[in-house]
Amino acid sequence: MVIDSGITDRRGRRITLRPVDDDNWRAVADVAPRDDQRDWVPALAARYLLLTERSEVWTSLAGYADETVVGHVMWGVDEDDSRWIGGMLVDAAEQGHGVGRAIVRTLAGWLAAQGHPVRLSYHPRNAAAARLYPSLGFTPTGAWEDDEVVVELATGGS
């Protein structure tokens, strides 16, 4: 299965989401954000891969720009059947080109098409997330997940 909404990054590369498998897991595990993002995400996507292996809730996906692994994102189903996006990392060398935006738009659109609310959470001091998610149509629900604000994709958004 490939999730392909036809979205490209600012370099014109087609962004797709693919299962993590025997061919790409090492490249996904090595995805590393910038050091200044460590307050919000782990040093390597490997942590998220382990989480999805040990959890029945989350599913990891590899983010591709054309045929190159550039990121990781995971999604899950909550008890109320809402769909959650979590664990997104874009490799430091790939940041600043719209890859993260394209990954979220691609996954959010695919999840929204399933007919359930699409949610995610982020720490309010994470300035990049606080700009990105509202610009994609996510609005606060009023709920909190630990110290993170919960947002939901507005109907018709992505």
Image (cartoon, helix red, strand yellow):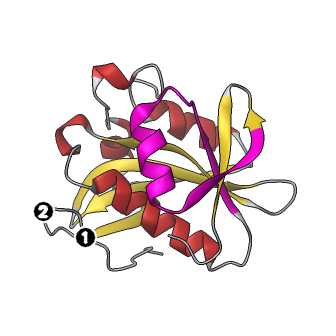
- 11 displayed left or right of 130: left
Which three-letter amino acid code belongs to the residue tagged 1?
Thr
- 136 displayed left or right of 145: left
Q: Position of residue 82 (x, y in %)?
A: 76, 61
> Is residue 90 positioned above or below 1 on the image?
above
User: What residue is disc 2 on?
Assistant: 11
Q: Position of residue 26 (x, y in %)?
A: 34, 42
Residue 44 falls within the magenta-colored stretch: no
Taking depth in this image into account, of 74 and 51 the one nearest to the observer is: 74
Element at badge 1? loop
Q: Is residue 7 visible?
A: yes
Q: CA distance from mark 2 to mark 1?
A: 8 Å
User: What residue is disc 1 on?
Assistant: 8
Label 2, residues with CA under 10 Å away: few <14, some 14-19, many ≥20: few
Q: Position of residue 128 (x, y in %)?
A: 39, 38
Q: Residue at x 44, y 68 (%)?
A: 106
Figure disc tally: 2
Q: Residue at x 36, y 57 (%)?
A: 101
**For the residues bearing labels 2 and 1, Cβ distance under 8 angstroms:** yes
Q: Is residue 20 visible?
A: no
Element at badge 2? loop
In this picture, which residue range is highlighted in magenta? Answer: 118-143
Residue 123 falls within the magenta-colored stretch: yes
Label 1, residues with CA under 10 Å away: few <14, some 14-19, many ≥20: many
Q: Residue at x 45, y 41 (%)?
A: 129
> Is residue 116 positioned above or below 86 on the image?
below
Q: Position of residue 120 (x, y in %)?
A: 62, 49
> Is residue 32 positioned above or below 66 on the image?
above
Q: Residue furthest right?
A: 80
Which three-letter amino acid code belongs to the residue tagged 2?
Arg
Q: Residue at x 79, y 54 (%)?
A: 78
The picture quadrant where one finds residue 114 is bottom right
